[in-house]
Amino acid sequence: MRKKEAPAKPNRLRIIGGVWRGRLIEAPSDNSIRPTTDRVRESLFNRLMHGAAGSGIALAGARVADVFAGTGAMGLEALSRGAAHVTFIERDMAAMALIKRNVAALGAEDRVSVMSADATNLPKAALAHDIALLDAPYEQGLPGPAMASLARQGWLKPGALVSVEMDESDVPPDADGFTLLDRREAGRIAVILYQWTANDKNYL
């Protein structure tokens, strides 16, 4: 008789800085979600902690949107490093359940919102955010439409920062109302920082 296979154990990610440094969160055991690597997260958050590229927007006390949230690792890293609140935006139900488990494991329920939504077609925002973190699936042309949706629906405060993670071979978004501040590469991954410089009330 064939022995039943044990269910796959979940992978783990670690928070790499801040008050939860070293704490582990859950990631899928399969390839359904591609978490951002430690190296890329460290590079990005080191910039965000100190007003990236002279933007004047720092992470401490910020309201952050984690878009295409996946495991929630980016938003939880932001909370660990001093963000006031994170809104996780994800449309996959399994990923949403995973985010909620990771939030609960860190006892952060009172500092987060979890929203089921298509990032390229967002509802109107209840409150504008200081920073948006976008880690869309690669090679599908999603960052540009997501940035436009964030702007159009009032998700971004004037001067808000938007980080976009993408394959280094992908063409960076050229979204109306956004100014490119900085681009860094780590292996085959590029992280591009934009600032929302248009008047969001007049954006169409």
Image: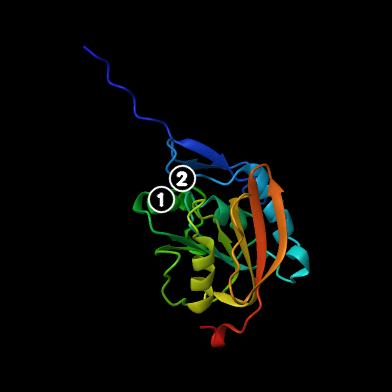
Mark 2: which secondary structure?
loop
Q: In front: mark 1 or mark 2?
A: 2
Tell me how far mark 1 sits from mark 2, CA to CA: 8 Å
Q: Are marks 1 and 2 in contact (CB under 8 Å)?
A: yes
Question: Can you give x and y, in whole percent of width and height, for residue 69 in the image?
Answer: 49, 55
Question: Can you give x and y, in whole percent of width and height, for residue 20 in the image?
Answer: 61, 48
Q: Nearer the viewer, residue 107 or 44?
A: 44
Q: Nearer the viewer, residue 92 or 185?
A: 185
For the image, the number of numbered tags is 2
Q: Residue furthest right?
A: 54
Residue type pointed to by label 2: Ile
Mark 1: which secondary structure?
helix
Residue type pointed to by label 1: Ala
**Is residue 71 in view?**
yes
Query: Is 32 rendered above or below residue 195?
Result: above
Residue at horizontal 55 percent and vertical 65 percent from the top: 85
Where is mark 1, residue-wise? Answer: 95
Label 2 crowd (10 A; few <14 / some 14-19 / many >=20): some
Comes first in the chain, label 1 or label 2: 2
Query: Is 85 rendered above or below residue 98?
Result: below
Using the rendered view, name the quadrant where residue 75 is placed. Answer: bottom right
Classify the position of the N terminus by image quarter.
Answer: top left
Where is mark 2, residue-wise? Answer: 33
